[in-house]
Amino acid sequence: MSLLESITGPRDLRGLDDDQLASLATEVRDLLVQSCSRVGGHLGPNLGVVELTMAIHRVFDSPHDRVVFDTGHQAYVHKMLTGRARDFGGLRTEGGLSGYPSQSESPHDIVENSHASTALSYADGLAKAYRIRGEDRHVVAVIGDGALTGGMAWEALNNIAVAQESRLVIVVNDNGRSYTPTIGGLATALTTLRTNPRYEQVLDLVKKRLTSVKGVGPAAYDALHAMKKGLKDALAPQGLFEDLGLKYVGPIDGHDRSAMELALAQAKRFNGPVIVHAITRKGFGYDAAERHEKDQFHQIGPFDVESGESPAKGRIWTDFFSEEIVALGAERPDIVALTAAMMHPVGLDGFQARFPDRTFDVGIAEQHAATSAAGLAMGGLHPVVAIYATFLNRAFDQVLMDVALHRCGVTFVLDRAGVTGDDGASHNGMWDMSILQVVPGLRMAAPRDGARVGELLREAVEVDDAPTVLRLPKGPPPDDIPSIGKAGGADVLVRNGAFDVLIVGVGSMAAVSVDVAARLVAQGIGVTVVDPRWVKPVDQAVVELARRHQLVVSIEDNGRVGGCGAVLLQTLNDAGVTTPFRLHGIPQQFLSHAKRDIILERIGLTPQALALGIVEDMTALADGGVLVDRVDVP
């Protein structure tokens, strides 16, 4: 049995000597690489926190002491050390381990925390609760320097600084990166702190002098290496945190486990809020990750362990946007681009390379991105804000009150919209088409294929008196689906037989709708399929088409409540259209992680399931009956 297999919980770490702990760290890294090479995942961040996580679990007593990760994608090592190493073969697969902490998996997990910059607020509340309840417990919040660029983290620090009785240790995991190098004033300050040449020169000199003294020298250096308060006061600007009134320990080599343990033990003894600043390297210990300049394997799909190479991939939705935004940038000098610490994932890296002065990475600060975009629009530019659909939720107030209220021409491009799968409940982009329906004046487009991405993006950036939204799913788009006609601004994709069923296929569901239509035609049912292209506002031509058919079916990759189908039904009712209506979408629930195709089958959004339901509905209508409510597959 390997050392890692023998670890049933954090307390097992305390009986290991230094050599065993070093061997354990190697086993952890090997398992990280092997597991992620098969199923993908956040490899780079976890390679960088092996010793740091081991130190936390040797100093603190989880789950009595609570450990909160920000973001949770750096918690793989934590999962292994809390007894889940044997289950890592099923990481991010249906029925297997989540890619984030999960309360349903272990008492050692309290917060999933896959949206950044929230851990300090959770930790603040936990520490205050334990103090009020008189419980002898510590809270440890592990937050990356990337997550510290989020405003919510600083709101929390502002409150933590005055909660002097909170037994809260904040570990800043400073690797200089979120996805890619961390951007902003905070990043500059941290870089200055960790790279000050005088600091490093003096530290090296002290190390050489102390370790040359037999017996007491190494021990004295370890203590200095962990605390080194006086040295830092003279040579490093750690006042960034101490000006807030927070005690500060560091910077510590986050890959030096013994130094981390000394620093954490010192922080623990203080019994108040303390920041421990750990310097780590993303991808540490795996050459292929360390050499990967783009993101140190921050999040990677399956790859070859020996070479670090991933299989060749086809074009994804993001690629079509990436190419078109560069072309638009060349044509229009007023177009600028913003993102929130996701330049490569959302496809703006090409625009940044071509137009660096017109590209802004604001860090993990979606709220600021939206309002800054409003300011850019007021200044005569047309901003394109590219973020993940799931993260737009965080900036809803800014979209509503700062952009839409002022009728600013800002285009939001939402990547990873709809069911995304492997990353679980927090990353499914299933809320955007519901929450954005309530924004007055906003126009929203959902392309059905790659060709429509560029087409609709060009239409969106022509709007200069209201916000526009372009919604892109995850993964490869279907083959281009040509239209056979127009209905107002909507594309007609299928028109076959009698006017029996009108299918309104939204975005990526247009391809599914065409497949459903073929199955219905084979059953002798007449079908019209339309792709609205612009799903907000509802096209009046679609309303008139609905009036002519016997049954209207809407299909969308979004939550059913308040989404495109719900708004279409309301619009039909307002127009006096009484055609029976069937709405298909994602049930309003948090979906567990699995491949996208598996989730779509589970919730009934497959051509076979949809066609079967429509046949049943048409049979009921033909028999003079009424439609009976069906509940989506749970």
Image (cartoon, helix red, strand yellow):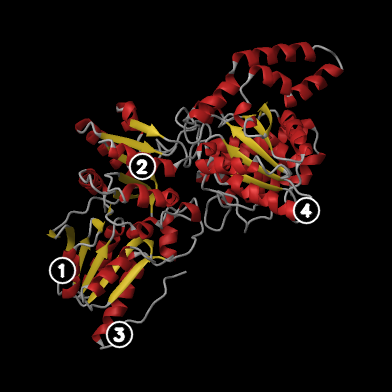
Amino acid type, residue under disc 4 in the picture: Glu
Check if mark 3's residue and mark 1's residue have beta carbons within 8 Å: no
Q: Residues within 10 Å of mark 1 (few under 14, many from 20)?
A: some
Choose the circle earlier in sequence order: 3 or 2: 2
- What residue would you read off at disc 1? 496
The residue furthest bottom is 624
Q: Residues within 10 Å of mark 3 (few under 14, many from 20)?
A: few
**Quadrant of res 366:** top left
Spatial CA span between label 3 and label 4? 60 Å
Residue 135 is left or right of residue 184, and the answer is right
Amino acid type, residue under disc 1 in the picture: Asn
329 is higher (above) or lower (below) than 407: above
Q: What's the mark number on residue 135?
A: 4
Residue 14 is left or right of residue 351, and the answer is right
Q: Residues within 10 Å of mark 4 (few under 14, many from 20)?
A: few
Choose the circle earlier in sequence order: 1 or 2: 2
Residue drawn at (33%, 47%) of the image: 403
Choose the circle earlier in sequence order: 4 or 2: 4
196 is higher (above) or lower (below) than 186: above
Amino acid type, residue under disc 2 in the picture: Ala
Spatial CA span between label 4 and label 2? 44 Å
Q: What's the mark number on residue 626?
A: 3
Residue drawn at (62%, 30%) of the image: 243
